[in-house]
Amino acid sequence: MAASTRSQVISLYRTMLRESSKFPSYNYRTYAIRRVRDAFRANRKVEDPKAVARLMEEGRQAVSLIQRQVSIGKMYETQKIVVE
């Protein structure tokens, strides 16, 4: 993997983690972060430039999906009720 591609992959990884950490719900937030880490860990050994480009495009689409889901989650955020 070329140095510029490596930096792009790392940048995408950090962006996905940053966006995933914005989920208001703890369960969604931890699930999204775990899925991002697992996906990048699973594709760590990919060397084929075409496969890397395809995975990068899928990652960019996933970032936009995460951003949409975070905004929807914030619109419908519920108030926490404490009953004693």
Image (cartoon, rainbow, N blue to C red):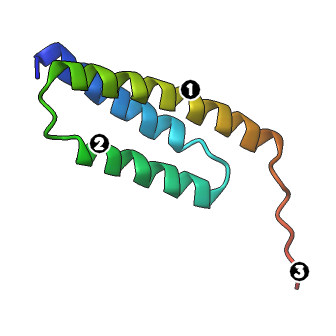
Residue in the image at 59% along x and 41% along y? 22
Residue indicated by mark 2: 40
Mark positioned earlier in the residue sequence (1 or 3): 1
Report the quarter where the C terminus lies.
Answer: bottom right
Out of 49 and 72, give the one closest to the viewer.
49
Cα distance in 3D space between marks 2 and 1 = 17 Å
Mark 2 burial class by Cα count in 10 Å: few <14, some 14-19, many 20+: some
- At label 3, the amino acid type is Val
Tell me if 25 is positioned left or right of 34 in this view.
right
Labels 1 and 3 touching (C-beta < 8 A): no
Residue indicated by mark 3: 83
Residue in the image at 56% along x and 52% along y? 29
The dot on residue 27 is: none
Mark positioned earlier in the residue sequence (2 or 1): 2
Mark positioned earlier in the residue sequence (3 or 2): 2
Out of 8 and 61, give the one closest to the viewer.
61
Residue 6 place in picture, x, y as percent: 18, 23
Report the quarter where the N terminus lies.
Answer: top left
Q: Judging from the image, what secondary structure is the residue with disc 2 in?
A: helix
Residue 13, relative to residue 20: is it above or below? above
Cα distance in 3D space between marks 3 and 2 = 41 Å
Cα distance in 3D space between marks 1 and 3 = 37 Å
Occupied quadrant, residue 11 = top left
Occupied quadrant, residue 3 = top left
Residue indicated by mark 1: 64
Q: Judging from the image, what secondary structure is the residue with disc 3 in?
A: loop
- At label 1, the amino acid type is Ser
Residue 37 place in picture, x, y as percent: 34, 48
Occupied quadrant, residue 69 = top right
Out of 62 and 34, give the one closest to the viewer.
62
Query: Which marked residue is nearer to the observer: mark 3 or mark 2?
Result: 2
